Image (spheres, grey):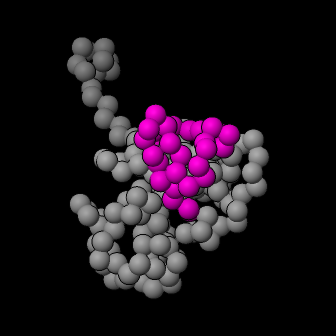
Amino acid sequence: MSSDAQGIGVPSFVHSSRFLIVTMGGRLFAVDASVVQGLLTLDEVESPDAPEIHGVIYRRVDLTERLALEIDSIDTNARWVLMAEGDLRKSIRVGSVHGLMELPLSRMLPLPPQFTGPERFWYRGLILFQNSVAPILNTRWMFGDMVDLPSEVRAGRSGINPEHPVIKGGTC
């Protein structure tokens, strides 16, 4: 007889996270859905540097430059992803949005040991999506919340490998 049949409730604490899966520069990325505030087409945005919705400005984070990605062609699939964390408002332009994905934390993969440089700051881990892998973007890095690191690491343009990342409020 199962515990449910006996009238004993068994809690099922399956911790999960949701991610918005996007393409930038022809590569898949995962954005923590908890920071996503909305999606806009390129036509819905007047300023390419800072989308504004109802008087709220979402400053652009140029991940194409920071991650040395190819520039996406502007087509009907391109979107602005509006993000917020605390009082900070940021936006990224993506080539396409594949949708939301929810998965248990146990299915998030750590970065492999080959990630030894500044990319350890850029990504929180990896997830499998369809027949590919999507790095999970580190929102603290995107929002510029890293301190005591050389500006090249914060910007994502350095091959240096700092021994100990310092992040406000915790680790990557």
Q: Residue furthest bottom?
A: 160
Image quarter where the N terminus lies is top left
Q: Position of residue 7 (x, y in %)?
A: 24, 14
Q: In the displayed structure, would residue 4 be above or below residue 29? A: above
Answer yes or no: is residue 98 visible. no
Is residue 121 at all visible to an observer of this figure?
yes
The question of residue 37 being in magenta is answered with yes
Closer to the camera in the image, 72 or 31: 72
Residue 38's place in the image compared with 160, above or below, is above
Near-viewer residue (125 or 97): 97
Quarter of the image for residue 170 reads bottom left
| 36 left or right, relative to 25 | left
Does the segment drawn in magenta span residue 66? no
Determine whether 63 is above or below 68 in the image. Answer: above
- Establish if 3 lies above or below 83: above
Magenta residues (range)? 36-63
**Which residue sits at x=40%, y=58%?**
143
